[in-house]
Image (cartoon, grey):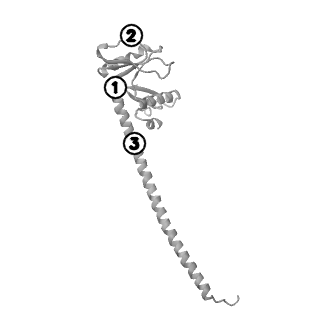
Amino acid sequence: MGPKKAITAEEGDDIKKSLEFMTEEISTIRKQQITILTLVEEVKTLRLQNAEKDKRVLLLETKVAELEQYTRLNYVIVVTFLKTKAVEVDSCNTEACHLLSRRSNSEKQAVIIRFANRKHKMALIKQGKKLKGTNVYMNDHLTKQNADIARKARYLKEEGKIQHTRTSNCKIYIKLKGTPEQANVLHIRNMEELDK
């Protein structure tokens, strides 16, 4: 090793200025780091709040759909004239009856009947068995959400993923596959429940 070289005053000033500059840069980086960490925590909090709000929105949408469905409890959709198929309709207990608009020209014209109470509606629905094998059918007047759920449940039954599906009083029920202990009947209120 050779002799140590002395640092000149000018070199010392350069080193001092470099250290001061680096200290300022490190201080700036630390401040930015604190800001970034604060923002990351804020994003985590917002994500949790967003997830909670999504749950509340789903719950509210489900409640709105249930309320909308409740307003349709006394309705029945009829595809063709029932009397020609020996299905009795008590006209004294019907409040209204009219044609529904068709979605396409090839679709059969549907008729909707509003009854004075559910008892008469259910009596008519029970007679739907007389229409088996014909192009005539009766359904509850479901909301779009419940109609989509019922359609998907029928698809899952056809796929063999569930044992049975039925609509009763505008509510959709499915029966799971499995042993009698496992084959629970579930009331499905939204698509997320059906997906589970």
Evaluate whether residue 163 shows in this view: no
Whichever of callouts 1 and 3 sits on the residue coming sooner in the sequence is 3
Determine whether 20 is above or below 167 in the image: below
- Amino acid type at mark 3: Val
Name the residue rendered at 49%, 19% in the picture. Answer: 107
Closer to the camera in the image, 33 or 160? 33
Measure the C-alpha gap from mark 1 to mark 2. 23 Å
Determine whether 180 is above or below 57 in the image: above
Residue found at the very far front of the displayed protein:
10
- Amino acid type at mark 2: Lys
Disc 1, SS:
loop
Disc 3, SS:
helix
Counting labels gives: 3
Which quadrant does the N terminus fall into?
A: bottom right
Closer to the camera in the image, 164 or 107? 107
- Amino acid type at mark 1: Leu
Disc 1 crowd, CA 10 A, few/some/many (<14, 14-19, 20+): many
Disc 3 crowd, CA 10 A, few/some/many (<14, 14-19, 20+): few
User: Percent from the top left, x then y, of residue 131?
Assistant: 43, 14
Measure the C-alpha gap from mark 3 to mark 2. 44 Å
User: Percent from the top left, x then y, of residue 132?
Assistant: 45, 15
Whichever of callouts 3 and 2 sits on the residue coming sooner in the sequence is 3
Whichever of callouts 1 and 2 sits on the residue coming sooner in the sequence is 1
Identify residue for label 3. 57
**Disc number for residue 73:** 1
Identify residue for label 2. 83
Disc 2 crowd, CA 10 A, few/some/many (<14, 14-19, 20+): few
Query: Along the horizontal axis of the image, is 68 left or right of 159?
Result: left
Name the residue rendered at 45%, 55% in the picture. Answer: 44
Determine whether 84 is above or below 76 in the image: above
Closer to the camera in the image, 144 or 18? 18
